[in-house]
Image: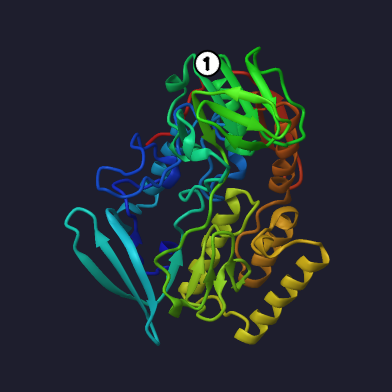
Amino acid sequence: MKQYHVNFTVFEATRNFGGTWHFDPHVGTDEDGLPVFSSMYNDLRTNTPRQTMEYYDFPFPEGTPSYPSATCFLDYLKSFVKHFDLLSHIQLRSLVTSVKWAGNHWNLTYTKTDTKENVTETCDFIVVANGPYNTPVWPKYDGIDTFEGSMIHSHDYKDRKAYKNRKVLIVGAGASGLDLAIQLSNVTAKLVHSHHLVYNEPKFFDGYVKKPDIMAFTPKGVIFRDESFEELDDVIFCTGYDFNHPFLDESCGVTSTAKFVLPLHKQLVNIKHPSMVFLGIAKKIITRVMDAQAEYAALLASGKLKLPSQEEMLNSWLKHISSLQVKGMKIIDLNVVGSEMDQYFGNLTEEAGVVRAPPVLTAIRDFNGVNRLDDLLNYREYDYSIIDNFHYERKYNPRQNIPCPVEV
């Protein structure tokens, strides 16, 4: 926005910027009584190479590991904010509670979390960017309320130390489930992992036990679909997150559910009211996509981008729906970009002239996705170097103490 001379304010609910990259030691609610929005935990490292996550005009310093720690990535964000002098535009402790369309402008209401005062601002343009990782999905099982041990979602996981010599169940094998399996190996007395992912499972440690899906809970443990039973002390659900936009009024003109938002032009623009855009709704993408989306939004807000007509945008969106049906996909896949990510970059460039992300980033993303499941315990021990727009190289570079050359 600043680059295109747009007057803007970022409303941030918490006391810090950085979103999910900012570690919050609280569980449930923070010091202001707000839900804890961050899902960060100690000793986390990125699971995709930093080259796919950095801003195009602000690379990490040379020497940064390809899989930096969360602390290093937060330092990178702080450095970015400092370099572009953005802090004066970020209004902390301002929880947005309502966004309404008022005929020719938006009314945005927020609560000052320190004074509890409600304030309404008039806005010409709205960017919704509250993130997809703050509303955890809790599964339901028979007998779950009878279980006498502890149960948390990975959203509330903070540190491996709490599980030393415990009998722990991890449910799920997405990014968090696999990462916590690595973290808790050789820490727990027994680590039971319930999932149905097919991958090159490494030898974690002698106390690791793979189990199928859960059938039911008992007061002392879990019965699985193969009718086996495991006695447990703790359960960690790594079962994903839902979208959550409770502040959007009906007048906004979008349907926002836990799994999708519609109708959006290019996974971005509210077709009914194009002065509202959503960042980060697109699924199965690299972080660099959101950088391109942000430039698109800034061009639109500044008046430098002329959109197709509402009818044209709606027809394009309906074609997208039809293509999902042809591919056998479902309505919950409405916001998935996935394998079409490189074309998505191209579409944004064609329509808005945003800086084109090079195809090599898609190649790195695709290789990393496969390699992570082939070599789970070691895939982060490699560093990537981009040679040109289409090629990269990868070298083995194991390091116990990973330095972070980012200066804040």
State the image coordinates of residue 354 (x, y, percent, origin top left): 60, 64
Disc 1 marks which amino acid?
A: Val
Left or right: residue 45 versus residue 309 is left
Left or right: residue 28 versus residue 336 is left
Query: Which residue is depicted at the point 53% across and 23% down?
Result: 232
Crowding near pointer 1: few (<14 within 10 Å), some, many (20+)? some
Compare residues 102 and 398 and report the one nearer the observer.
102
Q: Quadrant of the N terminus?
A: bottom left
Query: Which residue is depicted at the point 53% across and 50% down?
Result: 57
Left or right: residue 274 versus residue 195 is left
State the image coordinates of residue 123 (x, y, percent, origin top left): 35, 75
Specify the farthest residue to the right.
326
State the image coordinates of residue 209 (x, y, percent, origin top left): 67, 21
Judged from the image, the secondary structure of the residue bearing numbered disc 1 is loop
Q: Quadrant of residue 240?
A: top right
Query: Which residue is depicted at the point 41% across and 62% down?
Result: 2
Left or right: residue 161 versus residue 63 is left
Q: Which residue is mark 1?
A: 187
